[in-house]
Image (cartoon, rainbow, N blue to C red):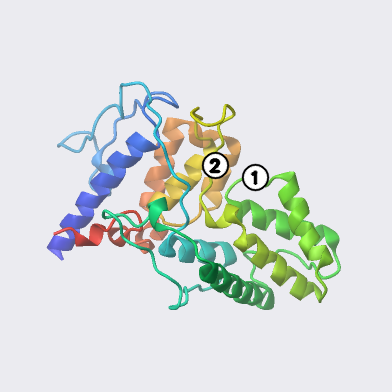
Amino acid sequence: MQRKTKRQNIYRSIVCCSLLVSLVACGRYSQLKETVSSSVLGGGGGTGGGGVIGEKACTTPSVPGKTGVGRLTTRQLENTLRDLLGISVTMPQTFPRDELAGGYVSLPETQLMSAVFVEQQLEWYLTLAGQVVTANSPAVISCAYASSATCVDKILSDFIYKAFRRPMKADEKTHFLKIYNTFSGTAQEKMKVTLASILMAPQFLYRELPIAPGGKGTTVALNSYDLASRLSYFLWESMPDAQLFAKAQSGELSQPDVLNSEMRRMMQSPRDRKSTRLNSSHTDISRMP
């Protein structure tokens, strides 16, 4: 038990330091001035007694790095579907599992898709969507949609927003409304197929990156929704919760003090403990001695 606790403390230190550097981005959103104490790591409070990591996250100008478009890992996909759909979710054993490369399982190079996997996902998403519709899961079905076009619009708009982890685009809404309206079947069958179609979209399965206006070779700062997803998948291995979405929507999350406050909240959340970060999808941390 003592050995496990030591490993957890080491990993929490890694988590905190990584977040301070990568999320605050070394001055891109202004310099972090607040002292970070051991309370961030779940220990005692105060700034004394060796608990201070550093008074400033960084003092050098931001040097943007390159990031590949990463697919949700097995654990992230299960957690995201559970939180998005409001039902119990377990990935079928027949699905391919994440491959380890250099101690990491979240590298784009290890997350290749095959035609067989795509077909497996479609069948699985249809099954999950059917469960949501049958159970009228309140996480998705918020009104009586069978005879109300307004309700259909609301359900799909809310679902797309959460599934894509950002505000939806006009053409996305048009596309999925068209699927619902043109599919031949009952209202329940229409909703089932449309929800599964949203889950099959690359905007759900992949963690999107902002497109630089200047094209290849230019850089772009992360917006508040990008930060929310990075923070959530790093700590929870799942999608942002309602509070994190609200902070992203208001733009507050781009403020260092708000970002740090949310980080503390998330690390103290039961949802954080459920993610079991010692077996994180980011690294094979479970191999630590």
Query: Compared with residue 190, is residue 278 higher up or lower down, i.e. above or below?
Result: above
For the residues bearing labels 2 and 1, Cβ distance under 8 angstroms: yes
Q: Which residue is mark 1?
A: 167
Q: Which mark is residue 225?
A: 2
Q: Residue at x 24, y 42 (%)?
A: 38
Mark 2–mark 1 Cα distance, whole angstroms, equals 9 Å
Which quadrant: the N terminus?
A: bottom left
**Residue neighbourhood size for the residue with mark 1, other residues' Cα within 10 Å, grouped as few (<14), some (14–19), many (≥20):** some
Q: Which one is earlier in the sequence, the residue at label 2 or at label 1?
A: 1
Q: Determine whether, in the image, residue 68 is placed left or right of residue 190.
A: left
Identify which amino acid the numbered label 2 is placed on. Answer: Tyr
Toward which corner of the image does residue 210 lie, by quadrant? top right
Position of residue 248 relative to residue 203, above or below, is above
* Viewer-proximal residue among 46 and 163: 163
Classify mark 2: residues with Cα within 10 Å, few (<14), some (14-19) or many (20+).
many
Task: Quadrant for residue 54, please give it.
Answer: top left
Amino acid on which the number 1 mark rests in the picture: Pro
| Quadrant of the image occupied by residue 62 | top left
Which percent across, then down, holds residue 74? 43, 64
State the residue in front, 6 or 76.
76
Q: Report the residue at 39% width, 31% height from top.
A: 25
Local SS, label 2 = helix
Q: Please state the horizontal and vertical placement of residue 223, each as a whole percent of the image.
A: 53, 35
Q: Compared to 132, does 288 lie above or below?
A: above
In percent of width and height, residue 269 lies at: 40, 55
Q: Residue at x 66, y 55 (%)?
A: 160
Instruction: Tell me if residue 17 comes above or below residue 288 in the rendering.
Output: above
